[in-house]
Image (cartoon, rainbow, N blue to C red):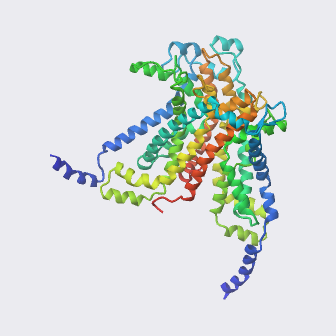
Amino acid sequence: MTAIANTHKPALRGRRFRRPRLGKVLGWITVAVLIVITVFPFYWMLRTALSSQNALYTDSSSLLPVDFSWGGFRRALGLATQEEALADGGTGASVELLSSLRNSVIVATCVAVVQVLCSLMAAYAFARLKWRGRDVVFTIFLAGLMVPGIFTLIPNFLLIKDMGLLDTLPGVMLPTLLMTPFAIFFLRQSLLGINEEIEEAARLDGAGPFRIFFHVVMPMVSSTVMTLVILTYIAAWNDYMWPLLVSSTSNSRVLTLALGTFYASSPTTGPDWPGLMAATLIAAAPMLLLFVVFGRRIVDSIGSTGIK
Amino acid sequence: MTTHRMQTIVEPSRRRSSRRRNDFAVAILFLAPATVGFVAFYVWPSIRGLYLSFTDYNIFQAPVWVGLKNYEKLLTDDKMWNSIVVTLEYVAINIVFQTILALLIAVLMQRLIRSTFVRGILLMPYLVSNVVVALVWLWMLDYQMGITNQLLEWIGLPRLMFFGSEQLVIPTIAFVNIWRFMGYTALLIFAGMQSIPNTVYEAARVDGASEWQMFRRITLPLLRPNLAMVVITSMIGSFQVFDTVSVTTQGGPVDASNVIQMYIYKLAFSQFKFGYASAVSVVLMLILLVISIFQLRLTRANSSDLV
């Protein structure tokens, strides 16, 4: 019996259309399980956000929204009146989601654009310009990669405090606004990978260094730069610890912080889960939207270069 | 004839441009903004942090130099040692399970999933912030109303206090972060797999190798340098876990999730012991430095059996 089975196997394997093997089936089952595990919490956010708070307690395991209601979103956006919120079982605590949404947009946009531009200029100086001491200076910048965030956290807080920038948007942005060692390192790598002949030709034609940088070099690395801008935007948007240190009021409170505060201010006995989940969805939505638009680019760039 | 003339025209100027060119003045302009950022927010804080670790400083009065006192205190500070043990437990659980899961997903991406769409879905948790992730899981793992505990009850198991029990809190936080990072880590590992030529797999298939054998004998050995880099980078990140702890437990119950970064944060911003907090930061930095140096040596010796 076994002998027959064995002789049959190679023949089967050689056929073009073979039946799916056990391994492959197991593989697809694993993929399906992983997708469910990944997607379910997102669905659960939505389902909870659209439920009404009081009904949630009676039927907490229903897969569909319990007693469908926009109350969660209304409370999260501050549209509901105090009485309405309390009647719905909300806390009446205000999230100030809109002002923190605006703050997050300003911070993430400025950080992503300015940081990548300044880092690209520095990277250009390290990759292309010729000057004495270049490699030494680059090594010093590179050493910055070794300094963990926690080590500079307290001194940076003190510096921002000394500058009188606590609880201001510049205070939230500054530490990452002008550069990160990683951005410089990464951009230098991609600059080294492009052809120098074109710059050389532009130089012979009499173009100055700034003209070359903006009109010749930048278009050539625009795709890498764009990817880095998106990833920096996401990182700045999601940052929590630094804003936690410097922000204290809605002047500079970003979304991540507003969410944390919203949760911390809700009663531990019965947090306003629909309101909270609506708020988290609103906070996550811009990133997910960015992902729908640039998803392929992000996946491909992480999947091929291992960019952080 | 014409080409010859062209060469004589082009060559001297090119030679001049590469030999004599000195872009020092331009370089200063290009480097200025980044250098300001680097000096102000990397170099200067590092020096200041080191200095503060030798002082008593409560932010309201000027720092007082106390020499090694903070470091002596460290040695007998049970809370600090507790936070190191807790952090190590977190890093161990996080890295072991995350790496295994990510490796599995990466292999599936390489051998089975061709679709960028599926890869994108697995990357989704990475795009939302730690705070969002922490809040969602706080809700899903809620003792009374969380769907996870409902499921446990249906299966016939007792409900669990995921964030409220001293034994479960660190594994819970570790798994929440694994959920956020597994797809991302898988993509990083998958990036490394791209450098393994397909011909190797084809050859193995001709020889009748099974998927498992190909994974053991081809993927794993050739992936080693890349895998080591990914593991070490994740490890450095895990040591600095803060957001999830801050949102869910604030270090509790009874310091059971008081990771180093949480401890430093409390020392500085609720007890105003900035000097002592800086000393603990130096300890954490030294731990990370050792790991980083290890990583740097790996990058230098960046060759797999393939090269």
| Residue in the picture at 52% in, 18% down | B143
Residue occupying the far bottom of the picture:
B1
Splitting the image into 4 quarters, where does residue B83 fall?
top right
Q: Tell me: residue A303, above or below residue B160.
A: below
**In this view of the protein, which residue sits in the foreground, A22 or A122?**
A122
**Where residue B230 appears, x then y in whole percent?**
54, 48
| Residue in the picture at 53% in, 58% down | B302
Q: Is residue B10 visible?
A: yes
Judge from the rendering whether residue B88 lies leftward or rightward of residue A73; answer left or right: left
Judge from the rendering whether residue B106 lies leftward or rightward of residue B211; answer left or right: right
**In this view of the protein, which residue sits in the foreground, A104 or B155?**
B155
Number of numbered discs: 0
**In this view of the protein, which residue sits in the foreground, B48 or B164?**
B48
**Where residue A143 appears, x then y in whole percent?**
68, 53
**Where residue A230 appears, x then y in whole percent?**
65, 45
**Where residue B294 appears, x then y in whole percent?**
57, 51
Splitting the image into 4 quarters, where does residue A83 fall?
top right
| Residue in the picture at 73% in, 44% down | A176
Splitting the image into 4 quarters, where does residue B262 fall?
top right
Q: Is residue A236 visible?
A: no
**In this view of the protein, which residue sits in the foreground, A42 or B282?**
B282
Q: Tell me: residue A120, above or below residue A256.
A: below
